[in-house]
Amino acid sequence: MRFFPLIAILLINCSTLERAEYGNTRSGYPDQESWGVKITLTDEGVMRALVKSGHLEKFNDRQYILLDKDVDVDFFDDLEQHTTNLKSQIAEVDERTNFMTAIGNVIVVSDSGVTLYTDTLMWNSEEELIYTDDPIMLTTEKNDTLFGIGFESDVSMNHWKILQPSGVMERAKDE
């Protein structure tokens, strides 16, 4: 009878150790975390984008980066001249392809005077295209406001199209 309490104490202690080991696992947590982030993306030494965010989480096993606070991206052309600015609440980056998805109150302002508003926007860095399948609102330098669903454009927003446009635009033929 003296051994029973000792065995019970050993069993309780073993299960407590097991839970403590599993409770400290890194599974699901980022491998790296940074605040006040600035990332310069280049293509053969030419700056293509400057990404800023209040917070970054990097997951090595998934080759995935989450920017989850005040994302601000400046895009540049082949001559490193600024072309466009993108702002969103968060962004996800696939490190294998450098494919970025901006999510939440996305606003893209081009230096040419075009502004895009949407909920999500994808950036294919290899093809230098931005696009979405979501509803959009677009304003132009001539004070036009266009609506639709789906959008495709080059990053500088010089050549864009609304996939399913809607609404009415009034303009004289010579404008």
Image: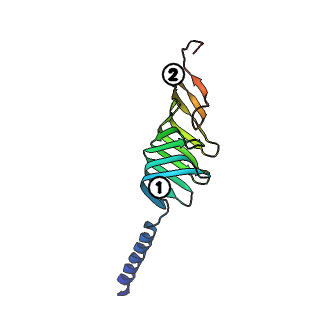
Q: Which residue is mark 2?
A: 142
Front-most of residues 84 and 57 = 84
Q: Quadrant of residue 153?
A: top right
From this view, report whether residue 68 is shown above or below residue 168.
below
Q: Residue furthest front?
A: 79
Q: Which residue is mark 1?
A: 57
Q: Residue furthest right?
A: 127
| Residue occupying image coordinates x 49% and y 39% | 86
Front-most of residues 118 and 80 = 80
Question: Which amino acid lies under the numbered mark 2 shown in the image of this protein?
Answer: Lys
Q: Which mark is residue 88?
A: none
Q: Residue furthest bottom?
A: 2
| Residue occupying image coordinates x 56% and y 12% | 172
Q: Return the x and y of residue 7 as percentages of the image width and height.
A: 40, 82
Front-most of residues 134 and 152 = 152
Q: What is the secondary structure assignment of the residue under circle 2?
A: loop
55 relative position to 116: left or right = left
Q: Return the x and y of residue 169 as percentages of the image width and height.
A: 54, 17
144 relative position to 161: left or right = left
